[in-house]
């Protein structure tokens, strides 16, 4: 069931269902068709007794960056918002449904997170039974940089990170390398990128007659995990990012004379002030939620990201414009200053546009 563009290659080899994201020219960014193809394959393989496990990986292309999946197709979001394209609604409903399916998949689902893993790429990997990272992994949830929030279940999996790490990652969009992803609970195993083809060969060439056999085969090939480079900053992250609200976090960081604090403040000052506040509230609410409830909340949030503000002054549309369309990297945030964000502005994003019985994710 591949799309005409063949952006998701589906193969069954031995006892393994192999999914390859095949859009390397766009760092394997997810389109609606790709979400549908992945979903269809996973649903078809659930009841196929011949398939013991699923492996998902990203294709590479000479001259392009290495990526598992760099996120959703944000240029499509921008175009669809301006055109009133109903596929924008379909994309988020179906993407979040896929995220839920992966977290609850009854067979081992292995995500080989080689290269860039951001946004939607996290959504199709964080629910994996085994999350493999490499020396080329660059992981982040950078949505506040485009006037969005860390969606695809980000509230759920970031809030399960230790201490205030989830708040820190949600607000700053900090890029992590392999050692930190494992230390902070966002990955399980480390392998050299050169070892991944050998792993796949072992999985497809040997009879994998049970889930346990698959898991043992992968675990046996794990290498020693690299050092967690950011572990020294954990005390500071917890001290600053546990504060009550974003202004208090900023004020706390301003009392810290370290280079790390200065870098963190610089990152926060570039983000959408409104979405910083929304993202902080999202992570803290999600900490007390099930995955399904978090995804329903995020579906409300993402609808409101394109609806609460008029398009002409909409932070999400403006953030995508500045980063990916005009590429001037000078977004005009609304409001422009953190001190002008009110609790009422933030709360508006958490009001569901749907009654519970009509919510697009009510069946999760």
Image: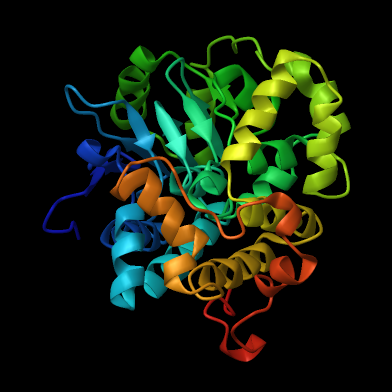
The reply to whether residue 85 is in sight is no
Q: Is residue 239 left or right of residue 258?
A: right
Q: Give the position of the N terminus as an image quadrant.
A: bottom left
Q: In this view, does 237 lie to the left or right of 42?
A: right
The x, y position of residue 198, in whole percent, is: 33, 18
Identified at 40% across, 26% down, the residue is 114
Res 351 → quadrant: bottom right
- Looking at this view, is 15 or 236 the one in front? 236
- Looking at this view, is 60 or 333 the one in front? 333
The x, y position of residue 205, in whole percent, is: 29, 27
* Rendered position, 6 above or below 178: below
Specify how the rendered protein is coloured: rainbow
The reply to whether residue 41 is in sight is yes
The x, y position of residue 104, in whole percent, is: 57, 57
Q: Give the position of the C terminus as an image quadrant.
A: bottom right
Q: Is residue 267 left or right of residue 66?
A: right
* Rendered position, 110 above or below 255: below
Identified at 32% across, 57% down, the residue is 41
Identified at 29% across, 59% down, the residue is 37
- Looking at this view, is 359 or 2 the one in front? 359
Numbered label tally: 0
The x, y position of residue 169, in whole percent, is: 65, 37
Q: In this view, does 313 lie to the left or right of 49?
A: right
Q: Residue furthest left?
A: 4
Res 294 → quadrant: bottom right
- Looking at this view, is 107 or 281 the one in front? 281
């Amino acid at each position: 069931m591949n799309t005409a563009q063949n952006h998701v290659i589906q193969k069954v080899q031995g006892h393994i269902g192999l999914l390859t994201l095949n859009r390397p020219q766009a760092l394997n960014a997810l389109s609606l068709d790709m979400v549908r193809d992945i979903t269809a394959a996973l649903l078809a393989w659930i009841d196929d007794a011949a398939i013991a496990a699923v492996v998902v990986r990203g294709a590479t292309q000479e001259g392009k960056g290495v990526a598992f999946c760099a996120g959703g197709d944000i240029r499509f979001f921008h175009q669809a918002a301006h055109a009133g394209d109903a596929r924008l609604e379909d994309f988020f409903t179906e993407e979040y449904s896929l995220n839920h399916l992966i977290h609850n998949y009854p067979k081992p689902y292995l995500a080989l997170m080689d290269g860039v893993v951001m946004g939607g790429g996290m959504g199709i990997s964080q629910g994996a039974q085994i999350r493999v990272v490499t020396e080329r992994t660059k992981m982040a949830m950078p949505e506040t940089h485009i006037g969005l929030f860390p969606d695809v279940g980000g509230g759920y999996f970031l809030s399960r990170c230790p201490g205030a790490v989830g708040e820190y990652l949600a607000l700053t969009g900090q890029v992590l390398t392999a050692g930190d992803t494992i230390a902070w609970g966002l990955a399980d195993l480390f392998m050299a990128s050169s070892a991944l083809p050998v792993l796949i060969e072992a999985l497809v060439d040997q009879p994998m007659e049970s889930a346990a056999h698959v898991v043992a085969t992968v675990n046996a090939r794990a290498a020693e995990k690299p050092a967690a480079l950011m572990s020294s900053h954990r005390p500071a992250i917890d001290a600053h990012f546990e504060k009550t609200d974003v202004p208090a976090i900023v004020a706390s960081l301003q009392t810290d004379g370290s280079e790390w604090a200065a870098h963190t403040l610089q990152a926060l000052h570039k983000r959408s002030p409104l979405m910083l506040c929304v993202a902080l509230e999202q992570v803290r609410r999600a900490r007390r939620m099930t995955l399904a409830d978090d995804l329903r909340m995020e579906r409300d949030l993402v609808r409101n990201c394109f609806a609460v503000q008029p398009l002409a002054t909409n932070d999400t549309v403006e953030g995508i414009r500045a980063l990916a369309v005009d590429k001037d990297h000078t977004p005009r945030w609304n409001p422009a200053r953190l001190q002008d964000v009110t609790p009422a502005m933030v709360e508006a994003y958490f009001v569901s546009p749907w009654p519970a019985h009509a919510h697009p994710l009510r069946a999760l």
